[in-house]
Image (cartoon, rainbow, N blue to C red):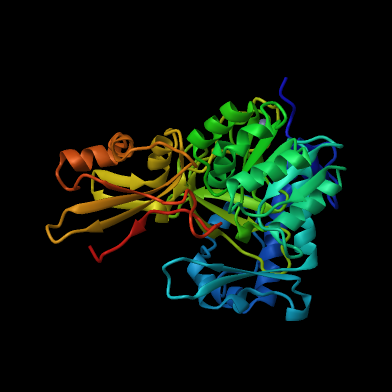
Amino acid sequence: MINITPLEAWIRDRALIGHNLLNKPFLETLATYQLARVNETIKYARSNTPFYRHHLASLPTTPLSILSDIARIPFTTASNITGNPYRFSAVRQDDIARIVTLRTSGSTGEAKRLFFTEADLELTVDFFHYGMSTLVRPGQSVAILLPGESPDSVGDLLLRGLRRMDVRALVYGPVADPSHAAKAIASFGAHCIVGIPTQVLAVAQSRAGSRVGRGSIESVLLSTDYVPRAIAKTLEEVWGCRVFTHYGMTEMGLGGGVECEALDGYHLREGDLYFEVVDRETGEVCPDGAIGEVVFTTLTRSGMPLIRYKTGDIARIIPHPCPCGSVLRRMERVRGRWDGVIRLSPECTLTLSDMDESLFLLPDLLDYRVTVSTGSDEKFRLCCDVLMAEGGNLTDREVIARLSEVGAIQKALAGSILKTPSVRFSEDGRWTTTGVSKRKIVWTNSG
Ligand SMILES: [Zn+2]
């Protein structure tokens, strides 16, 4: 039997506060709540942030009468924030409890800053509490392989959410040494592991990873913008556990949505965030089922409200009801990012997700990085740096064979616009950095 997502009752209770809608169908209640919160957010952002005062200057001050009218409001982009994050802050600097600085690799060093108040962080703890109750029961324990050293970091907020349901947690942090992490997880006796897909995979594939024991790990939560299916499948096989995925980004207040026991798409944090999927070209809202870019509006954020923020993530709303019985909308697992796409020709679009689904099927491959460049002959070069498990036994030929099965690479090779890919193996079985940044294809023009 599949239990209904705990997010439904949580969101229902939130939506009912202050609204006399007890006898109305839930979706109607939710829409009324969200419309009120969207209008409140617009008013709040305009009065309190220099950015939105200017950005929404031409918008009438009358509230939206239906939720779909939000489509008239201009988008907010990541570069709006990068330019001057303090223009987004809606409270005095004294009232900011946490500032998260995100550096985008390869940029000129301009960082994106995000501000959260104590109240904003409390809402995230609340979401983690209810979201995690899908995976663990009171009395169980969780190993958190996410940064958690500093107060209010993601690992710390998750720990606080788990404590509220009487679940013990070990905040181990990002994985630099997979064997060491596996031993720590085993001695802690974790029932559940939360981490970044490639890092949890490295733990499972390490020698000590098998000692963690098949059956003792009941569930894994993989958290990032995009989770390769092939990694989830390997973890299910190694540990005999259920693998859930969480969707979130710092801009969402870390948590965005989490899968229910149906393991088929995220139920979203709809009490705090209003999600849309929009057409990348026209900006119009896509009907349910159509693929587009994920856009969200914060409904309860006090430190840094965001209105129609473009995430760059590619996904769609699943148009069918969830097998868990919830009426909440579901978003299909994110397929990747618009900036993770490289167009080799009009017919050949190379995506990280396509390469992931092929390469992560290789036993002993823990992670990889792909760099694409052009040579003096105008042909594309593709170099794949592979991180192999300890004692792994992969060859160039196997990696190239897998790469050549990726549709775009196959076509580009057949059309002679791409040279045969080259492969390099990392020497000591681990990356020199334990990056928690987003994975992407690197494009270089230097040839
Ligand atoms: Zn469900």
> Residue placed at 58% from the left, 54% from the top?
176
| Residue 93: x %, y % from top left | 73, 80
Would you place residue 393 above or below residue 422 in this image? Answer: above
Q: Does residue 35 appear anywhere in the picture?
A: yes
Q: Does residue 66 appear anywhere in the picture?
A: no
Q: How many marks?
A: 0
Q: Nearer the viewer, residue 174 or 247?
A: 174
Q: Nearer the viewer, residue 205 or 140?
A: 205
Q: Quadrant of the C terminus?
A: bottom left
350 sits to left or right of 189: left
Q: Nearer the viewer, residue 186 or 61?
A: 186
| Residue 341: x %, y % from top left | 36, 51
| Residue 381: x %, y % from top left | 23, 53
Of all residues, the one furthest to the top in this rendering is: 1
445 sits to left or right of 104: left
Would you place residue 304 above or below residue 199 in this image? Answer: below
Image quarter of residue 365: top left
431 sits to left or right of 45: left
> Residue placed at 29% from the left, 34% from the top?
401
Split into quadrants, the picture shows ligand 1 in the one at top right
| Residue 245: x %, y % from top left | 61, 40
> Residue placed at 42% from the left, 36% from the top?
357
126 sits to left or right of 377: right
Q: Quadrant of the N terminus?
A: top right
